Image (cartoon, rainbow, N blue to C red):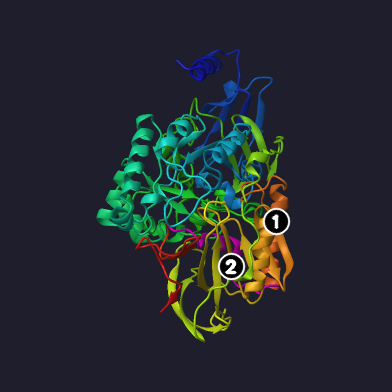
Amino acid sequence: MEPNDIKKAVQYRKLIDVLLDSSQFADIVLKGGYFINVITREIYEADVAMKGEYILMAGDSKELIGPKTKVENIQGKFVCPGFIDSHMHFESAMLTCTEFSKLSIPTGTTTLIGDPHEIGNVLGVHGMQAMIEEARSLPNRVLFTVPCAVPDAPGLETSGFDVASKDMKELLADPYVQGIGEIQSFSNIRPVYEHAPELIDDLVAAVSYANSIGKTVEGNAPGLFGKELAAHIISGGNHVSCHETTTKEETVEKLRNGVSVFMREGSSQRNMADCIRAITEDGLDSRRTILVSDDMVPADLLTYGHMNDIIRRTIAVGIDPVEAIQMATINPATHFGFKDVGVIAPGKRADVVVISDLNNMTVDQVYLAGKKAAEKGELTIDIAPYIYPESVKKSVKRKPVTLQELAIEAPGIRAKVRAIEAVPFQNLTGGSEFILNVIDGIVQPCLKQDVLPLLVVERHGRTGKIGKTFLHGFDLKSGAIAESVAHDTHNIIVTGTNYEDMVTAVNRVIAMDGGIAMIKDSKVVGDLPLRIGGLMTDELTGKEMSEKVDELSQLAKEVLGCGMEVPFMHLSFWSLVTSPKWKITDMGLIDVDKFEVIPTIIN
């Protein structure tokens, strides 16, 4: 028997004493509220009694109120389990786990399942362990699903470190690791099967080991149906999720095949409204539908909320409030096999949310393990800042670049080129062809057609390569933007209206040891250092980061004339080679469906 099991047995014995010994009482009673029972999908009047970090009971608790019991009158309000975000990336918010938690706890999110494959791509096992170490210090529950394959597409991209099945024993042994994260290496089923079958062998080995020790596995199945979906499900050990589902038809197919559909509703990718139609229009059972954020920027957390806002949006498209809450409580708890959170019932961890307005999901109070952690949008507990070690802050291993290195060259006076086509609020892309002018052997951007150079500069010191193509649909009028946040291998991605500003932008990112840089007329318009793996910072609070990103977004719009919302997040996804159609890496323009590099210049 493990020490934690012994401790829990002792605590449970004390709970029984409180319930049955008339001289013992609850620590806290939330009295007179409307209880949201996510087990039975009911709302009825009931008290909620807590002792220590546990729920004593939900029901008439007057006999559990003693002279030292803290009684909270919540008449007219609703009480439900704390919310779970089942799939998110701290790196996408550019915040530490600590600063993200400070923003999310007051909105009712009490459990976070982080996927650290961003820092894993840059710094390998060491980077992921640094993030996991931070989570141990937090009052909310933060668990991780770790990648079993880095990079996802060997030969098509360059990561800072490689991670494979051989690393799973060390990572999965950590109690803060829930299991294996999104298995992107087998998202492009047919190309991987035909061109890189060794990836499947390694994936199955990692998954089999994870399952053998009781760990979960998350899928990643964009646009998969029929045999290809079945192969993906089996590769994940037959119990997987998918957060890349974007249509009702996909949702129906996946639910029918036992996939937990993680309906994504983040800052730049919003798919819930289409996915939920499988419930509202086709009447499918919602038990395997789960709300997730995937990627959230700090400003959205501060302005709109976190899981409470996603639940609010779900209610707004026609889902009953209790059913929507189930999608962020009992449904994810069931998927992950959590026995102590996701419901309010005797002996569960006392992660509790009090809501003053159900349809608008206005969070009034939040309890973490029986302790009030937030009230009326403000933390009521102290959470100390967390500083990362220097070993994760020196990840850019690239010398400054020159214009000659970045220029896209072609003979003649005109060139036919391929260009990635941006899709707003999706990480999916299209592909188009354009005719561009060539001056002195260099292909020129064309603002009239909205076609700009798009490059990825390898920054891990492994190959030194620079991938080159064009981009259509970013709507940038002047200057350049570069950043070291570029999914999944996080080399430096850059686009701009001229090569000179692109060179300055890349070199500014290198000088900062990672971050975001915006340049116009060879001058810095705005920048943001991200020294933790070139992805995050421990130098700003969540509020400060929100203000900074908002400032940069406004500068991108007002000074550079960028017409795309959340430009930095969109830019970061155009190197994601596990998502169709065309993407760009340090190896060049990638045809995702064919699993190969294709030329940007068409002869």
Tell me: 601 left or right of 304: left
Circle 2: residue type: Glu
Residue 77 lies, in percent from the top left, at: 60, 42
Query: Residue at 66% across / 58% down in the picture?
Result: 509
Q: Earlier in the sequence, mark 1 or mark 2?
A: 2
- When the figure is inspected, residue 458 is found, relative to residue 589, above or below; the finding is above
* Number of the label disc, if any, that sits on residue 511: 1
- Of circles 1 and 2, the one toward us is 2
Q: Nearer the viewer, residue 352 or 94?
A: 94
Instruction: Judge the density around disc 2: few (<14), some (14-19), many (≥20) Cα neighbours within 10 Å.
Output: few
Residue 330 lies, in percent from the top left, at: 45, 39
Query: Element under label 2?
Result: helix
Residue stretch rendered in magenta on the structure: 559-577
Q: For the residues labelled 1 and 2, say whether their Cβ atoms are less than 8 Å apart.
A: no
Quarter placement of the N terminus: top left
Tell me: 278 left or right of 151: left
Residue 62 lies, in percent from the top left, at: 58, 25
Quarter placement of the C terminus: bottom left
Q: Which residue is mark 2?
A: 405
Tell me: 394 left or right of 246: right
